């Protein structure tokens, strides 16, 4: 099972390699990665965004391609070029991203690296006008669909579902809680407080949180985090299948 | 006076050229241009933004440089390169932009092409967490400082103050009302409804709204709008000084 395979992989036991993996550790696998922010329209000109640059998600997609996988990258609005060798689906809102993920499943691995907006506002059809002397408007938020939890509980659930937790405090505690709440297999947790400089920056200090425990990686480039994560996931997938 | 000079300029009467203008119609002038969106933080990772690309404001700054002016460009977060020959001040929020404008005045011409957020939220110090089963949060908005009105009423008011009105309906009516409310000299009005494709696009269909009336320009590139606007402003400035 996946839990046992994750435990074994984290213990660093000998890695089993399946015959199909000859052309790369993820050869023959379909990997779906989400990346970047989502934009939630307030009206035709305003929107709610977040500081995700998409660098980590795009690096993961590129690393999965390098490992031989067929990769579908579902990206929110970013200024990054499309990584070579992926199918790229560009979306704007959390609901767009949710629909795109549903469309491209099934997959062997789902990696939700996008910073999906938890909430949207009910968008106005016309630009909201400032009225002289009137009180400022109040936005009531509506919860967006939960992509990670939905994928984790889908009838065609990918064998390995990986989420991200971007936190400004109590990083690991929040990640553990998120893992259980979303029913996913792994959470990559990182500190996105301004001091850490992760959002928009080129480096990441990641913690790999599973049901078995936490593995904290040293600060390294987002490309290095991506390569290490993809190697781990390929290993876990191979172990879980070998154990069947 | 400025009103008379605008009237004359729009009537297309013979243009007077001052001796100092030999090196370019805005030689010896200081022009301050704001451009791009502002980002208003909700918490350390989320913010409210708008769809302004900064293309029109940056093109105006470049056109003012080409006309011989000393140009200060105050830009919100954009992905455009800095135009050559400008002093560029990069800002994030409306309050940052307001402070930067105050710092770089006095000027002969102020052109407020930025899409400044009317409102901000009182930003949270920590990332707002989604709580299981809890109602979605409500954001109460706070009005931002009004840069255009403040510049128009400043003791060191630039001789020519130009605003923009991005509207999705009743474009000219809203622009006229804005001109009076903000005490500025000209409003460049444009239709930013999705159908018009102005926000983020490369073309603009501008209406030059003054106390004397409205001049509607045909759809043209943002660079052409910038060049035509700068030529007009140089003309108005020369006329208003010649009339003194």
Image: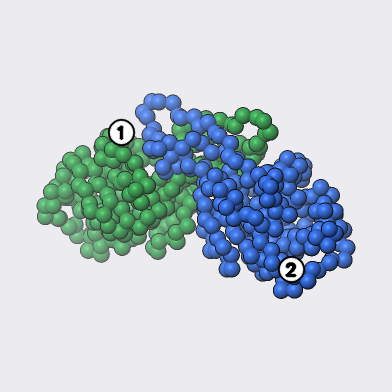
Chain colours: A blue, B green
Residue A38 placement (x, y as % from top left): 55, 48
Residue at which label 1 appears: B181
Q: CA distance from mark 1 to mark 2?
A: 65 Å
Secondary structure type for disc 1: helix
Q: Nearer the viewer, mark 1 or mark 2?
A: 2
Residue with the most extreme left position: B13
Residue B194: mark in rendering: none
Q: Is residue A28 left or right of residue B42?
A: right
Q: Nearer the viewer, residue B119 or A47?
A: A47
Residue at which label 2 appears: A25
Residue A140 placement (x, y as % from top left): 53, 31
Q: State whether residue A106 is above or below residue B120.
A: below
Q: Which image quarter holds the C terminus of chain B?
A: top left
Q: Residue at x 29, y 44 (%)?
A: B189
Q: Residue at x 28, y 40 (%)?
A: B171
Can residue B38 be seen at all in this image of the molecule? yes
Q: State whether residue B58 is above or below residue B211.
A: below
Kindly indicate whether the residues beneath marks 1 and 2 are on one polypeptide chain: no
């Amino acid at each position: 099972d996946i839990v046992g395979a994750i435990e074994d992989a984290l213990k660093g036991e000998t890695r089993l390699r399946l015959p199909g993996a000859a052309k790369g550790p993820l050869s023959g696998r379909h990997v779906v990665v989400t990346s970047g922010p989502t934009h939630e329209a307030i009206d035709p000109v305003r929107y709610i965004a977040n500081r995700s640059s998409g660098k980590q998600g795009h690096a993961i997609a590129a690393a999965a391609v390098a490992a031989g996988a067929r990769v579908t990258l579902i990206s929110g609005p970013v200024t990054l070029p499309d990584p070579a060798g992926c199918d790229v689906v560009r979306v704007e809102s959390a609901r767009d991203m949710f629909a795109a993920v549903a469309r491209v499943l099934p997959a062997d691995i789902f990696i939700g690296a996008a910073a999906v907006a938890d909430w949207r506002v009910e968008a106005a059809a016309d630009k909201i006008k400032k009225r002289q002397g009137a009180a400022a408007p109040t936005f009531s938020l509506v919860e967006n669909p939960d992509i990670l939890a939905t994928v984790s509980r889908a009838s065609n659930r990918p064998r390995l579902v990986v989420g991200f937790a971007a936190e400004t405090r109590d990083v690991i505690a929040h990640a553990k809680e998120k893992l259980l709440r979303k029913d996913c297999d792994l959470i990559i947790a990182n500190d996105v407080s301004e001091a850490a400089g992760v959002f928009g920056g080129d480096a990441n200090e990641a913690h790999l949180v599973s049901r078995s425990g936490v593995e904290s990686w040293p600060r390294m480039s987002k490309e290095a985090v991506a390569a290490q994560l993809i190697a781990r996931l390929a290993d876990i997938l191979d172990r879980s299948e070998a154990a069947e």
